Amino acid sequence: MKTALLALACCAASISACAEGEIQKGADVFATQCAECHSLKEGKNKKGPSLFALLGRPAAGLAGVAYSDAMKASKWSWTAEKVDSYISAPKLALPGGTMKFEGLSDPRARADLLAFLASVK
Ligand code: HEC
């Protein structure tokens, strides 16, 4: 209930901030959900590829990363929409992909995360 009220307050204060998500909250989502496997430093790959300057780059686009055949064949480009649908259910979005992450079902958390990722460039 408290969360819903906060979300409403955010929408009332700024429609666009609401739609775009909040960078600071997104940083927290990244830290708890993605940082185990992904770095934000350019060229630093962990279990997963670096997510530095992710938006706009082609899927499986980094040298030196052992991407799955599925990711290499996807021909995706990481628009905000594509990242959003991928991380909501990675195994459904990309059968044969090797990202061992169940997915982030909360659209609000995804919007915050996307706002944060867009700021890392
Ligand atoms: C358990 C480790 C793990 C976690 C947690 C994880 N990932 Fe991944 N991620 C991977 C791996 C491994 C790949 C490569 C997948 C493939 O090649 O099929 C990947 C690939 C990606 C890619 C494609 C990048 C490219 O260069 O094409 C994106 C985008 C991505 N992850 C975003 C995220 C986000 C955002 C989160 C947090 C919500 C997350 N991942 C959580 C391991 C992880």
Image (cartoon, rainbow, N blue to C red):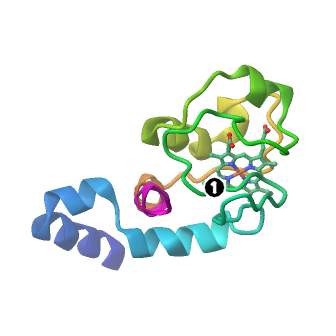
Within the image, what quadrant is residue 15 found in?
bottom left
Secondary structure mainly formed by the magenta segment: helix
What residue is rendered at 50% in x and 45% in y? 55
Image position, residue 33 (x, y; %) = 65, 65
Question: Mark 1 vs ligand 1: CB under 8 Å?
Answer: yes
Q: Quadrant of the N terminus?
A: bottom left
Is label 1 in a helix, a strand or a loop?
Answer: loop
Amino acid at pointer 1: Leu
What residue is rendered at 12% in x and 70% in y? 13
Residue 115 is a magenta residue = yes
Q: Taking 48 as reference, is 114 left or right? A: left
Image position, residue 91 (x, y; %) = 73, 36
Q: Nearer the viewer, residue 16 or 61?
A: 61
Q: Residue furthest right?
A: 66
Within the image, what quadrant is residue 41 found in?
bottom right
What residue is rendered at 62% in x and 73% in y? 31
Residue 60 is a magenta residue = no
Q: Taking 71 as reference, is 15 left or right? A: left
Q: Is residue 2 above or below residue 16?
A: below
What residue is rendered at 23% in x and 62% in y? 17
Q: Which residue is mark 1?
A: 51
Within the image, what quadrant is residue 18 found in?
bottom left
Q: Residue furthest bottom?
A: 2
Q: Taking 57 as reference, is 4 left or right? A: left
Image position, residue 6 (x, y; %) = 27, 75
Query: Bounds of the magenta span?
Result: 113-121
User: Within 10 angstroms of label 1, few (less than 14), some, or many (20 or more) residues?
Assistant: many
Image position, residue 107 (x, y; %) = 43, 52
Q: Is residue 5 above or below residue 37?
A: below
Q: Nearer the viewer, residue 44 or 76?
A: 44
